[in-house]
Image: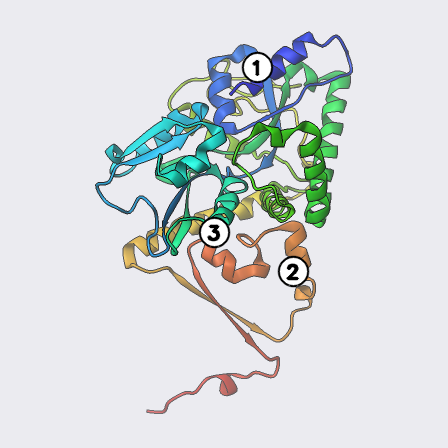
Amino acid sequence: GLEMRRVRDKSDASSSSSSVTIGSVEQNIFIPTLCDDPGLGVRAVAANFRRSPLCLASLASSSSSSAHDDVGKKVVVGAHDDTVSLIERILSSGPDAERYAVISSPRATKIADLKSGAVNSIQAYTTTEVPTLERQLDGSNCEDDTVVKVDMLEGMNGAKLGYSQVLFAPEEDLVGDRRDVVRAFLDATFRGWETAIRDNEGAARSVDECRAKLGLDDENNDHWEGSFSYTVQNVGLCCDAVKETFQGDRLGVIDAERWNEATEWLLDGKSPPGGGGGGSGSGGGEGKGDFGADTSGVWQPSSKLLAGNELARKTLEGAKESAEKFRNAHGRKPSLAVITVGELARYTHAEKRMRYFSNGDLSWFSKTSAGEANGFDVKEINLPESATTESEFTFGTA
């Protein structure tokens, strides 16, 4: 929660007219902090992740859906200092709220605390601590059928956390020559992600080099494993998340509607000072609309592009909600059969296209896994081009 203050102080101390200061933080930290201290004067300009990878990770039997299944048992959740209140709010809005106790847990030892039983669940990222835990289970003293269970915080009991790894800058850096510097930084950042998406291993080598130069291994935390294969996995998971921010002609785009929905939930009834967003050409306004977000378009696709990326994602999210209601009502997932007759030319490079532009949770080229991720049982049926109704179906006669 200190990143925004550090960016403001660094910007105020700078005497250069051409340098800019950019920070990164979660929207669920950014919005409440800016509401409490509007003098920070910073605006969100882009985001690395569209969906928060924040989750509760626990260890449980492979036969249970969650470590929290033992009804009546107290569940102690370890969280970071700046996230305790958020997780308390989410859990208190659901059933059996009294079962949960959220405590501040040291970042450096939270995985060890979970494995030792000091806590039953920990705040984690699906891109970092979760794969670390999964790897550590091998050769551990855990029961043979113990697995890592993940409960996503986004959507839990109606929670809307919005964007993750949000890039933000001081308001004064979004005008004049500094604006061009911000745009150049964002362009370089997301071109870098494009390179990483196409070459996970090459990006992983760069990550390991930077980690050594910055002394990150000296932090002595247990968040990540030191192997190169882990870094490749971590980079790949992050790339899958970054691809979801693509809109129009670029990665990293913040959609105003999604931003505002999360902002309204995060403010929980509070009215933000001054109302709306900021940046060059912004008139502010009343209410929660665009609060904290740049509205000058420093990192938005051209309005001449009919970009349907975000619309498609929202449609899929709506389908996932419908599938969950169906499952609750009927005790099973809705089913979908996809019949393909013959070979489709666009499938020739399906694997490469999915790797470059999407992920298994969203892509048409991974219909079975996309269905599983969104609450549907999908069965793919591939028939030869010569197939006929008569050859594939048997009809009875009266």
User: How many numbered marks, from 0 up?
Assistant: 3
Regarding residue 304, the answer to whether it shows in the image is no
Q: Is residue 276 left or right of residue 192?
A: left
Indicate the amino acid at tag 2: Glu
Q: What is the quadrant of the C terminus in the image?
A: bottom left
Element assignment for label 3: loop
Q: Residues within 10 Å of mark 3 (few under 14, many from 20)?
A: few
Q: Residues within 10 Å of mark 2 (few under 14, many from 20)?
A: few
Q: Tell me the tag on residue 5.
A: 1
x, y (%) of residue 322? 39, 51
Give me the residue at 67% from left, 14% from top.
Answer: 172
Indicate the amino acid at tag 1: Arg
- Give the labeled residue for mark 3: 139
x, y (%) of residue 259? 52, 31
Looking at the picture, tell me which residue is in the foreground, 367 or 98: 98
Give me the residue at 73% from left, 39% from top.
Answer: 191
Marks 2 and 1, the one that precedes in the sequence:
1
Looking at the picture, tell me which residue is in the foreground, 92 or 274: 92
Q: Is residue 317 left or right of residue 334?
A: right
The answer to whether residue 157 is above or below residue 324 is: above
Residue 153 position by quadrant? top left
Q: Nearer the viewer, mark 3 or mark 1?
A: 3
Q: Is residue 320 left or right of residue 339?
A: left
Q: Nearer the viewer, mark 3 or mark 2?
A: 3
Looking at the picture, tell me which residue is in the foreground, 120 or 14: 120
Element assignment for label 2: helix
Looking at the picture, tell me which residue is in the foreground, 265 or 22: 22
x, y (%) of residue 291? 52, 22
Marks 3 and 2, the one that precedes in the sequence:
3
Q: Tell me the tag on residue 351.
A: 2
